[in-house]
Image: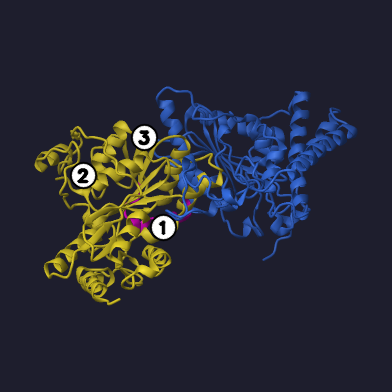
């Protein structure tokens, strides 16, 4: 059975949130600019992969509305009192929105020693930023769903002790929900009288690398799987900034106020395929959340073509400058390969031998 | 004297009272059972989990990332295999994040054969564990060492795997744990949960001292200069028995070096012992192909080749798919005292 890309249907059961368009013109434009910056960053890095300025690219073109909303809504900071993020490799936009500079992502793409997430050790989009509670992104699909109940459990305990706490938020794709970790997360987050403040988010782009979800999954909506555990759920159009904003805000509010889990399924587009392994080229047949939002704001008379061009040019200038600066940086010294083997830089290797 | 399960329990009590342990959890770890080997009875932070090993390791990782201090139990190491990628992640997270996220967590699990546990209660895990960089791995042979190594595991800011030799968990020690009452029936009355209704029971803990044993330090369990057996876990006891028998026959005094830590291991102690006698037998019960002892053989050959007086040897479990239930099969799979004796006699009699 084959499926033309443009024949993929959106998941049914989308919840129509009672949302209004962003009435604040300034906020809407800022939101759009952030989406554009995210897209340009991804395209900059895709070009880098094609120019052999990075061994591999993976990211989230098409998920800008979701990532921007998430980055704006998260309670950013370090420690239990702030939100704890268990992201995956399509969430650059969220961390960019939170305030990370473009060069940090490009540094990881170029595996230079100044890469603040992994020191040149990990793939691009494998973010780890302790000062903002961004837990390490892993290549192992869905393992973050086994880990997230742990941070949520710690937050639950702190809240019961009367402390101010954030919530835990875990994000993964639709294909990964076939892993047992997803089931683990549903079970561990909803144990009777021991529920944890965990927002589970499944970004559903309808594909696992090359395999259409509809050839592998029989469930109508992934979110339905949480209902058996008494977990509240929603399905939302992640290409619409206002809808995803409202859905995220609503689900976050629920988790914060009840201390209970929530599963939000977000329908998103995958505009450039899985990764550089499939070329990283723009694919046809998917809605582009930036195009859609631009058109709506233009129709309202809030932006012009010239303004859009200025935004795009500014983002490219920012990305190109970041790349120019990253090019001046160096790969990690070979002698540092054993650094951070253990905490406090305790060395590993073969005991008693020099490295 | 306390048995090893009581020793672990007392160390965990000290951990939750004085060393910041926040969560001790696993399948049947909390009340009323307190662990299938009773290692967690009466502990105030012990709780039961779903029957989900991946969830248990994931929970420990999340708690560590959140700044808590978890001690997770996998009920038998035979059931840890489906967590292997999470164990890899726990081991590489500090390195992969350039030091941002050290993983301050302990995983304890009973390991090895010796209780007629058939295919899935007899596995060893030391060889595979040694392939998980980023973890520290310990395996005690006495209750006192179990107590001290667990305290060190708790105090260590890295992931530490505590392999409990399951055949020794109910074996009493020969040394008092600092603070342990000398009357073992008194200790039992204080910290062992009663049979029947336990709903009102609370442990009464002795006043225990913090007496950690440094991870990475071996201990000479028996002195000797004729040869050295390097081993850990329950095979320390078996090696000592064989060495005593050999000694009684006047064939020489054989040292038994209890490694206690598989990673980082005490190469200095091993190297010194090998230098002294030129004869070494590495002994453990994990399967023999890509066995941890093979790595130690490699180092022995690389660093002691010209001073060895006999070829170095490894005695390990047979490379078979499982430990059979019938004692004849288990004994044929896992090194027994007669196997150790055979290898030791050959080692001692080989002419240079």
Establish whether labels 3 and 1 are both on one chain: yes
Q: Which stretch did the figure color magenta? A: B73-86
Find disc 3 in the rendering and name its residue: B22
Question: Which chain hosts label 2?
Answer: B
- Can residue B121 be seen? no
Is residue B118 toward the left or the right of residue B245 in the image?
right
Q: Residue at (27%, 68%) from the top-left corner?
A: B334
**Label 3: element kind:** loop
Which quadrant of the figure has residue A95?
top right
**Label 1: element kind:** loop
Q: Nearer the viewer, residue A132 or B30?
A: A132
- The chain drawn in yellow is B
Find disc 1 in the rendering and name its residue: B130
Identify the colour of chain A in the image: blue
Label 1 or label 2, whichever lies nearer to me, is 1
Q: Earlier in the sequence, mark 3 or mark 2?
A: 2
Which mark is drawn over residue B6? 2
Establish whether labels 3 and 2 are both on one chain: yes
């Amino acid at each position: 059975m084959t499926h033309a890309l443009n024949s993929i249907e959106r998941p049914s059961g989308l919840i129509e949130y009672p949302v209004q368009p962003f009435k604040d013109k300034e906020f809407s434009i800022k939101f759009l600019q952030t989406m554009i910056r995210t897209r340009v960053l991804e395209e900059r890095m895709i070009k880098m992969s094609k120019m052999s300025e990075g061994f591999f690219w993976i990211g989230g073109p098409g998920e800008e509305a979701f990532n921007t909303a998430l980055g704006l809504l998260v309670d950013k900071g370090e420690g239990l009192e702030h939100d704890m993020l268990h992201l995956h490799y399509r969430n650059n936009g969220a961390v960019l929105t939170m305030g990370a500079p473009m060069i940090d992502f490009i540094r990881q793409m170029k595996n230079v020693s100044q890469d603040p997430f992994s020191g040149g050790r990990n793939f691009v989009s494998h973010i780890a930023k302790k000062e903002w509670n961004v837990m390490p992104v892993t290549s192992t699909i869905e393992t973050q769903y086994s880990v997230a109940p742990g941070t949520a459990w710690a937050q639950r305990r702190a809240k019961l002790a009367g402390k101010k706490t954030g919530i835990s938020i875990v994000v993964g794709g639709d294909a990964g929900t076939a892993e047992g970790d997803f089931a683990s997360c549903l079970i561990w987050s909803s144990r009777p009288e021991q529920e944890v403040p965990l927002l589970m988010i499944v970004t559903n782009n309808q594909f696992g690398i090359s395999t259409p979800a509809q050839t592998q999954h029989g469930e109508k909506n992934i979110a339905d799987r949480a209902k058996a555990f008494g977990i509240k759920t929603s399905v939302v159009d992640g290409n619409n900034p206002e809808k995803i904003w409202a859905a995220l805000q609503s689900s976050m509010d629920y988790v914060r106020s009840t201390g209970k889990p929530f599963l939000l399924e977000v329908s998103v587009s995958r505009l450039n395929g899985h990764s550089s392994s499939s070329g990283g080229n723009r694919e046809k047949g998917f809605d582009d959340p930036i195009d859609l939002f631009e058109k709506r704001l233009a129709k309202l008379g809030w932006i012009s073509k010239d303004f859009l061009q200025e935004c795009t040019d500014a983002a490219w200038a920012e990305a190109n400058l970041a790349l120019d600066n990253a090019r001046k940086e160096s790969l990690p010294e070979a002698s540092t390969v054993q650094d951070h083997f253990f905490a406090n830089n305790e060395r590993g290797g073969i005991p008693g031998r020099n490295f | 004297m306390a048995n090893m399960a009581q020793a672990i329990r007392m160390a965990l009590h000290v951990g939750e009272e004085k060393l910041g342990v926040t969560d001790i959890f696993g399948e049947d770890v909390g009340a009323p059972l307190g662990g299938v080997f009773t290692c967690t009875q009466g502990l105030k932070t012990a709780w039961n989990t779903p029957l989900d090993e991946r969830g248990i390791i994931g929970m420990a990782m999340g708690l560590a990332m959140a700044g808590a201090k978890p001690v997770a139990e996998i009920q038998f190491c035979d059931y840890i295999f489906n967590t292997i990628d999470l164990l890899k992640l726990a081991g590489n997270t500090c390195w992969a994040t350039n030091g941002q996220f050290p993983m301050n967590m302990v995983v304890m699990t009973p390991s090895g054969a010796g209780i007629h546990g058939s295919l899935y209660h007899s596995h060893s895990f030391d060889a595979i564990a040694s392939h998980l960089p980023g973890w520290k791995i310990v395996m005690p042979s006495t209750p006192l060492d179990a107590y001290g190594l667990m305290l060190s595991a708790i105090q260590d800011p890295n992931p530490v795997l505590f392999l409990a030799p399951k055949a020794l968990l109910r074996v009493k020690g020969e040394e008092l744990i600092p603070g342990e009452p000398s009357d073992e029936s008194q200790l039992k009355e204080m910290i062992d949960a009663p049979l029947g209704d336990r709903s009102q029971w609370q442990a009464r803990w002795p006043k225990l001292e913090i007496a950690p044993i440094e991870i990475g330090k071996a201990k000479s369990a028996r002195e000797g200069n004729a040869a050295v057996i390097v081993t850990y876990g329950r095979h320390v006891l078996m090696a000592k028995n064989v060495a005593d028998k050999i000694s009684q026959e006047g064939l020489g005094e054989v040292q038994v070096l209890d490694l206690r830590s598989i990673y980082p291991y005490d190469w200095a102690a091993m190297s010194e012992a090998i230098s002294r006698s030129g004869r070494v037998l590495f002994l453990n019960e994990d399967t023999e192909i890509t066995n941890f002892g093979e790595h130690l053989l490699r180092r022995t050959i690389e660093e002691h080749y010209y001073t060895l007086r006999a070829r170095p040897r490894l005695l390990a479990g047979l490379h078979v798919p499982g430990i059979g239930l019938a004692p004849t099969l288990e004994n044929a799979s896992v090194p027994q005292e007669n196997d150790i004796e055979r290898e030791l006699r050959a080692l001692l009699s080989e002419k240079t």
